[in-house]
Amino acid sequence: MKLAYGVGALKLIDRNPEIPEELEVFSNRVYKTVDTLQLELDVYRLRDAGNEPKPTMVFIHGGAWKTGKRSDYLPYLIDYAQKGYVTATVSYRLSRVAKFPAAVQDVNCAVRWLKVHAEEFGIDPERMVLIGGSAGGHLSMMVGYAGEEPLFEPQCEAGALSSEVKAIVNLYGPTDLTTDEARGRGEPISFLGATYDERPDLYRQVSPRFYIRPGLPPTLIFHGTIDSVVPVSQADSLAVWLGNAGVPYDYHRLHGWPHTMDLSKKVNAYCQFYIDRFLGEYL
C-alpha cells in the first residue's frame, strides 16, 4: 500500500519485518469455532519476560469489515512486545462470511479467551487494551463500550468472563454510522446486510456513539483531517461525546493526514509516542 502526502512520497514503515529472536510467538491459536470455521489469534511476548503478568494489547485489523488480516499489525505487535507488553492479534468473521453482529461477537470472544488463558501467556487480565485502525478501531470501541450488551454476548469457551478492558486506542475508526455520509457508503451496507432505509435500527446498534456513558475505558483517538474514508468529523464528535460523559480521552487531530496515516514512519512514531504516554497513565 502506498501513501502520498502533497507532492512527495513518504517514507513508510516496513510492514513485514523479521521477528526478532528475543520474541516468542504463539501462532494460529484457535479461540472460537463457528460451524467448521476456526477463528485464530497470535500472541507475541519477550522470551525472557519473567514471571510477573504483563499488560496486554489486543490488535484488531481494519479493512472495511470485509478484507484485511491479523498480520497487518505485525510492526506494532513486534514493537510493543519488545517494549514489554504481551501483544495479540485477532482474526474475525468478515462481512462476506457473516454480517453484523458476528465480528463484534468474535472480538468479544477473543478478549475473553485471552483472559481464560492469561496464565499461559503471562497476561495481566486487569490491564488489557483494545487497539485498532479503521474497522478495527470501530470493533475495538464496540467491544470496549458495549461488550456486555446481550446482542454481543458470544458463545465461546470463556463463558461468563467479562470482556472489559482498561483502555482503548482508536485510529481513524468510525463511531456513528447513522450520519448521512456513513449510511450512503457501500461498506456499512455490506457489513450490515441492509441499507439504512431498510434497517435504521441496525445502524444505531452498530454505532459506538450510542453506547457512550460514564465509566467507560479511557480512549485515545488519532485521526487525520483529510481522511476521505472515515471523515475526521467522526472523531471530532467522538471526543465531544466522551467529554460530555466524563470519559477520559486524548484526541490527536493530525492536520493534513489521510486514512491509514500511521503507515508513514513519521506518523507511526508520533502515534507510538502518545500511545506509550497514554498507557503509562491509564494502565
Image: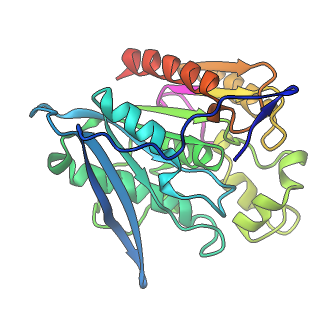
Considering only vertical position in the picture, is 38 above or below 143? below
The image quadrant of residue 156 is bottom left
Q: Where does the image place residue 8, in percent across and percent down from the top left?
A: 82, 26
Taking the spot 39% from the left edge, 44% from the top edge, the residue there is: 18
Q: Is residue 49 visible?
A: yes
Q: Kindly report the secondary structure that dominates the magenta region of the rendered protein.
A: loop
In the foreground, 53 or 44: 44
Q: Where does the image place residue 242, in percent across and percent down from the top left?
A: 62, 25
Q: Is residue 242 visible?
A: no
Taking the spot 16% from the left edge, 33% from the top edge, the residue there is: 49
42 relative position to 94: left or right? left
Taking the spot 38% from the left edge, 56% from the top edge, the residue there is: 110
Q: Which residues are magenta?
A: 211-220
Q: Where does the image place residue 13, in percent across and percent down from the top left?
A: 57, 34
Considering only vertical position in the picture, is 38 above or below 165? below
80 relative position to 11: left or right? left
**Magenta span includes 219:** yes
Q: Where does the image place residue 178, in percent across and percent down from the top left?
A: 81, 49
Q: Residue furthest bottom?
A: 36
Which quarter of the rendering shows the C terminus? Answer: top left
Q: How many marks?
A: 0
Query: How was the colour assigned to the protein in this rendering?
Result: rainbow
**Magenta span includes 68:** no
In the foreground, 114 or 83: 83
Considering only vertical position in the picture, is 128 above or below 203? above
254 relative position to 215: left or right? right
In the foreground, 192 or 60: 60
In the foreground, 108 or 213: 108
